[in-house]
Every structure is written in structure tokens, then in C-alpha cells.
Image (tube, rainbow, N blue to C red):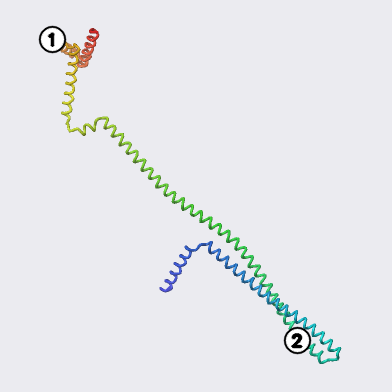
Amino acid sequence: MGILSRTSYIIRSKINALLNRSEDPTETLEYSYEKMRDELQDVKQGIADLTTQKKRLEIQKRRLEENVEKHNSQAREAVQQDRDDLARKALEKKKSKMSQIEELEGQIAELENTQETLVEKKNELQGRIDEFKTKKETMKARYEAAEASSRVSEAMTGVGDEMEDVARSIERAEERTDEMEARSEAMDELQDSGAFDDALSDKDSIDRELDELSSSREVDSELDTLKAEMGKSEPEADTGAEETESADLEDELEADGDVDIDSELEDSEIEAELDELKDDT
């Protein structure tokens, strides 16, 4: 295959593909149907013209037949008048008219045969057109249904894609929300634990311990002041004796090794203070 042949083939293929994409089957069917109807109309017009021509010949035949009767009468009358010459002329004209009638009858018969043939063709074409019309309407209905189904399928496909995007967006939003909630709970937990205070403070651990000791001394001082105001302060001598007694008791308990000295001492001091409060009341 030469270059020109291949080029021509490719061009025809492209044009054919373009026509296929742009072709609407319903429009093609309607066009074919209209063309068939036009052909049927042409056939009907031909039959009408043929019938008209046949009628003209039939009219001409009737006139000739009338002339034949006229010439026959003329010949009879001429014979009665002993005019054989006139009778001969009348009979000659009669014969000529009869020859024309025979010729017209042949033409009329031929036209009738043609008319019958055309009528049969017209009826056959009419049947094909009616059949094509039924198929055309069926094909149009099928095509429109398929086209509608295709549009619905395309729309559903588009909706499906959009729903997938929406689902992914919702999933990402849920993950983001869970992350933010977890971060918020973590922040609250760190806030409650005081981790933020430690992180934001410029004091080191020694400063914080000193602050705690200072706060404890302030509490002890305030407690002593409160006791002095209420007359609950104890003599220094008694305090010393109590401390000596507590030290002896601590040594004894340590020697025994049975209890925690600091814990027992703290409990005994609390019980002693409670007993004093009961006695005062």
C-alpha cells in the first residue's frame, strides 16, 4: 500500500469515526423514514399520472366509438339514397376510426397493466414503510431508554466517586478530631499534674525545695501564734522534758526494733495533744 493510499485510508477512517460519534441514531431513522415516505409519494404520483393518461385514452376511445356509430349511420343512409359513393366514404372513415379504437384499446390495456404493477409496488412499499415505522419507533424507544440508563449510570458513577471522596474526607475529619481530643485530654492531664507550671517556672529543684521549707516554717509560725493567742502555748521546760522523754522512748524502741520510731512518735504526740484538748474542755 502506497503512501497516498494509506493517507486516504486513514482520512476516511477518521471521518468515519467522527461521523459515528456525531451520528444520532434516532435522527438517522427519522431521515430514512422520511425518505421512504417521499418515495411512496412519488409512486402514488406516478400512479395518479398513469391513471390520468388512461382516462384520457378511454375518453378518446369513446369519442371514436361514437364516430364509428355515426359513420355507420351515414353509410346506411347513403345506401338508402342510392349514393354508394357516400356510403363508401362513410365506411372508410368508420374503418379508420375502428383502427384507432383498436390501437387505443392496446394502449389502455398496457396502461392498466402498468397501473396494476405500480399499485402492487405501492402497496408493497406501503407495507415496508409501516413495518419500518414500527421498527423505527421500537428502536427509538430502546435507544432513548439505553441513553437514559447510560446517563443514570454515569451520574451514579459520578455520585459514587463523590461519595468516596466524602467518605475519605469524613474519615480524615474523624481522625483529626480524635487526635485533637487526645491532645486536649493530654494537655488537661499535664495541667492538672503541674507539669506546665514546672516547665514554665524559671526555678530549679533546689529553689522549689527551699520554697516548700519556707512555706512549712510559715505554717508552723502561724500555728504557734494561733496557740499563743488562745493560751495554748506550753512552757519551754516542759517542752525540753517532753523532748528528752521522747528521745528515751525512741532509743528504747530502736533497741527493740519492733516499730517505726518516727511513726510511733508522731502518733503519740497527736494523742497527747488530743488528751490535752479534752482536759481543757
- Say what secondary structure mark 2 lies in: helix
Q: Mark 1 packing: few (<14 Cα in 10 Å), some, or many (20+)?
A: few
Q: Nearer the viewer, residue 86 or 16?
A: 86
Q: Is residue 202 above or below residue 246?
A: below
Kindly identify the amino acid type of the residue bearing the numbered disc 1: Ala
Residue beneath the point at 42% across and 74% down: 4
Q: Mark 2 packing: few (<14 Cα in 10 Å), some, or many (20+)?
A: few
Image-based side of 166 in relation to 113, left or right: left
Residue beneath the point at 81% across and 92% down: 85
Image-based side of 41 in relation to 259, left or right: right
Kindly identify the amino acid type of the residue bearing the numbered disc 2: Ser
Q: Earlier in the sequence, mark 1 or mark 2?
A: 2
Q: How many labels does the image show?
A: 2
Q: Position of residue 171 (x, y in %)?
A: 38, 42
Residue at numbered disc 2:
96
Q: In which quarter of the image is the C terminus?
A: top left
Q: Which of 96 and 187 is in front in this view?
A: 96
Residue at numbered disc 1:
237
Q: Which residue is the extreme one toward the top?
A: 279
Residue beneath the point at 61% across and 65% down: 129
Q: Residue 266 carries which label?
A: none
Q: In which quarter of the image is the N terminus?
A: bottom left
